[in-house]
Image: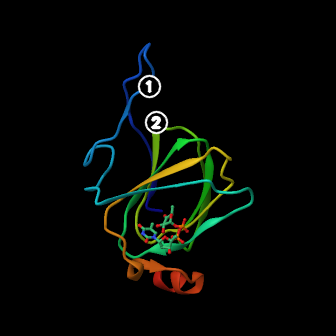
Amino acid sequence: MDTKMMKFQLHGDSRGQLVVAETMAEIPFEIKRLYYIYGVGEGIERGFHSHKNLQQVYIAIHGSMKVTLDDGTESKTVTLDDPAEGLYIGHGVWRKIFDFSPDAVLLVAASEHYSEDDYIRNYEDFVASTK
Ligand code: T46
């Protein structure tokens, strides 16, 4: 599955924490878009799609959430709860994001501008696309 957890650079000291993620180093693509999700209510699940070309890195910059990743053959669930870590997700991975803590902020760095044409939002179409 084209996903991996990545550690960012930590520069914390007695004044607090400072975390660095650089393009083409910790972030393995040129960032064209940033967005963030917060204020997600209890029991809400987001995602339920894959991307044809988009690569993304998810960062739980506050609070926590879970992400289920599925490549059409296997699936796994990871917890994001460390602002010094990122979850890289390549294309061809179905994702569900859920179990957001009330204080959660999910920052996403994306390799492309927004395009609805890049989404596969039907699970059967997604599985067919992996064959
Ligand atoms: C992902 C997860 C973590 C835009 O107009 N521009 C954008 O850049 C994005 C990301 C969304 N939108 C619009 C499209 C929808 O009308 O915002 C609305 C909500 O988007 P969506 O239903 O896709 O939200 P999620 O949380 O299900 O998924 C989003 C991203 O789409 C997705 O790539 O990985 O956040």
Residue 69 vs residue 72, the one in the foreground: 69
Residue depicted at 40% across the width and 63% down the height: 90
Q: Are marks 2 and 1 in contact (CB under 8 Å)?
A: yes
Which residue does the numbered mark 1 point to in the structure image?
A: 17
Name the colouring of the figure: rainbow
Q: Position of residue 122 (x, y in %)?
A: 56, 84
Residue 50 vs residue 110, the one in the foreground: 110
With respect to residue 46, does 10 lie above or below? above
Name the amino acid type tagged 2.
Answer: Ala
Residue depicted at 62% across the width and 50% down the height: 65
First of labels 2, 1 by sequence position: 1
Considering the numbered disc 2 on the image, is that residue within a helix, a strand or a loop? loop
Q: CA distance from mark 2 to mark 1?
A: 9 Å
Taking the view exactly as shown, the residue that stands out farthest to the right is 43
Residue 21 vs residue 125, the one in the foreground: 21
Name the amino acid type tagged 1.
Answer: Gln
